[in-house]
Amino acid sequence: SLHYSKTPLFETDAKGRLIWSNAAFRRLSGQSDIKGYDWITYIHEDERERVIKEFSSCLKMCRKFYVETKTMKGKDVILSGYAYKLGEDQNGGYLINIIQL
């Protein structure tokens, strides 16, 4: 199950808001509860604008999201995810994994 994966994972809705994460992501981000947590705060502030721009583009085009960036703690990571659809005309969101370099 994705809940118990050792790979940090989180899911967004079609607008990019965090709606789910597994325990590995919560440990990595330092968040015990994701309610109200904005996943972009995990990304280093100098990188956020670039990451948000790419993520927004991927949401609009319903394409793979892939970006190398830094966390707030200075760790190099890759965020990679795929869009999924709820129906023919309705984007569902993204399931994103984090790979620590």
Image (cartoon, rainbow, N blue to C red):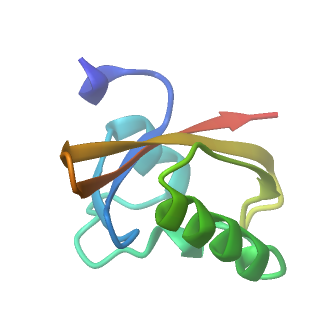
Q: Nearer the viewer, residue 7 or 97?
A: 97
- State the residue lying farthest toward the top: 1
Numbered-mark total = 0
Q: Residue at x 56, y 72 (%)?
A: 56
Can the viewer see residue 42? no
- State the residue lying farthest toward the left: 87
Q: Is residue 71 left or right of residue 83?
A: right
- Up-down relation of residue 96 to residue 58 (above or below): above
| Residue 55 position in % (x across, y down) | 60, 65
Q: Residue at x 26, y 45 (%)?
A: 85
Q: Residue at x 57, y 75 (%)?
A: 41
Q: Nearer the viewer, residue 5 or 48?
A: 48
Quarter of the figure with residue 99: top right
Q: Looking at the figure, which quarter contains the C terminus?
A: top right
Q: Nearer the viewer, residue 64 or 11?
A: 64
| Residue 62 position in % (x across, y down) | 47, 53
Q: Looking at the figure, which quarter contains the N terminus?
A: top left
Quarter of the figure with residue 72: bottom right
- Up-down relation of residue 80 to residue 1 (above or below): below
| Residue 57 position in % (x across, y down) | 61, 68
Can the viewer see residue 48? yes
| Residue 77 position in % (x across, y down) | 75, 45
- Up-down relation of residue 22 to residue 42 (above or below): above
